[in-house]
Image: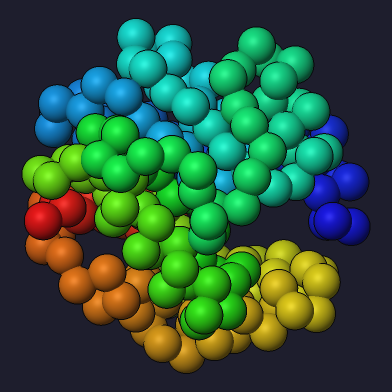
Amino acid sequence: MGEGRMAWLYDALFGPILHRVQRKVVEMVKKHGCRNILDMGCGTGMQCSLLRKNGLDVAGIDINPYMLFRARKKGLECVRGDIAHLSFPSSTFDCALLSFVFHLNDMASIRKIADEARRVVREGGGIIIADYGAPRGRKGRMLSRFVKMVERMAAEEHHRNYKRYEGRGYMEGIIEEFNLPVVERAAFYHGNIEVVMLRNV
């Protein structure tokens, strides 16, 4: 909850960094014919807002009231809830989106969140994950120092979960957990951020 009190700064701090990543998510969603999307862990609604501007039907859910306050100020349809225990019926959405969710959760929560994403997305639909990736090359390793610095400033449990995420191979560990076919993937900032689309089967 404490981290969420900085929600008013989130868009200004991270918006410029994440804009390219968020544009790629929109491109993937449109390319693969997803019309209604659930943004699981929508935060301040930056991605939801961009999807809606592109004519897509999007709902957001987040547990943090400070983040949701910012999202609702943008006129977005966002509800408060736990993404590990969704109230939506099965096969409701064409696509579920999880942006920077997995690196801050423990393994038990990761498994529950993955199960819920698979449940609420129709067969043949997409699950898009945007999160930290393994740095590539010298420039990637230099940029990863900045990531690690940011993560060290997070709450103790958050940082501990990030270290576990890193130890499991970053995005590769999450792909393995889902055990679904990879449809498309893209890397940004010399591998430090990745976007992966999985096909729900």
Q: Residue at x 44, y 50 (%)?
A: 98
User: Considering only vertical position in the picture, is 97 above or below 175?
Assistant: above
Q: Is residue 135 left or right of residue 85?
A: left
Q: Is residue 51 above or below residue 189?
A: above
> 135 and 72: which one is in front?
72
92 left or right of 138?
left
Q: Is residue 83 above or below residue 72?
A: below
Q: Kindly tell me whether residue 186 is visible in this rendering.
A: no
Where does the image place residue 106, in percent across and percent down from the top left?
Answer: 58, 79
Quarter-of-image position of residue 74: top right
Specify the quadrant that holds the N terminus. bottom right
Q: Residue at x 68, y 84 (%)?
A: 160
Please provide percent x and percent y for residue 143.
54, 66
> In front here: 69 or 165?
69
Quadrant in which the C terminus appears: bottom left
Q: Residue at x 47, y 90 (%)?
A: 167
Residue 158 sits in quarter? bottom right
**Which residue shows up at 38% across the image and 63% down it?**
114
